[in-house]
Amino acid sequence: IIDRGIVLTGGGSLLKGLDTRLREETNLPIITVDDPLTSVVLGVGKLLDELDLLSKVTVQAQLRSSRY
């Protein structure tokens, strides 16, 4: 995130002034994708094509959360 910034996708990224506020609060680059609504659908489609990877990420996240 520090190197590339925050990428906004989905309907929330269309909120007026969100990118500016995040930029001011984080001092990081904020990028809003060209088509935020479609990008979420495409991303989920790619994720579903890689269910093995999804299960690995889910297990790792569960292990991390159980430590706290």
Image (cartoon, rainbow, N blue to C red):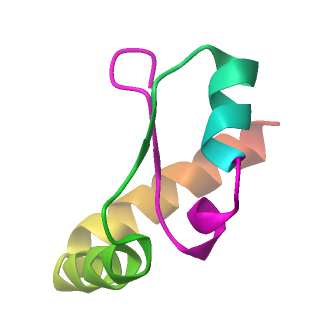
Where are the magenta residues, as a range? 1-17
- The quadrant of the picture occupied by the N terminus is top left
- The quadrant of the picture occupied by the C terminus is top right
**Residue 55 location (% of width, % of height):** 37, 71
Tag count in the figure? 0
In the depicted view, which residue is nearer to us: 61 or 18?
A: 18
Residue at the image point whose x is 74% and y is 34% from the top: 21
Q: Quadrant of residue 44?
A: bottom left
**Residue 57 location (% of width, % of height):** 41, 57
Q: Residue furthest right?
A: 68
Q: Residue furthest front?
A: 16
Q: Quadrant of residue 5?
A: top left
Residue at the image point whose x is 53% and y is 19% from the top: 28
40 lies above or below 68: below
Residue at the image point whose x is 59% and y is 75% from the top: 11
In the image, is 2 to the left or to the right of 45?
Answer: right
In the image, is 15 to the left or to the right of 31?
Answer: right
In the depicted view, which residue is nearer to us: 37 or 61?
A: 37
1 lies above or below 41: above
Magenta region includes residue 9 = yes
In the depicted view, which residue is nearer to us: 29 or 57?
A: 29
**Residue 49 location (% of width, % of height):** 17, 83
In the depicted view, which residue is nearer to us: 6 or 47?
A: 6
26 lies above or below 10: above
Residue at the image point whose x is 20% and y is 77% from the top: 46
In the image, is 50 to the left or to the right of 12?
Answer: left
Q: Quadrant of residue 34?
A: bottom left
Magenta region includes residue 19 = no
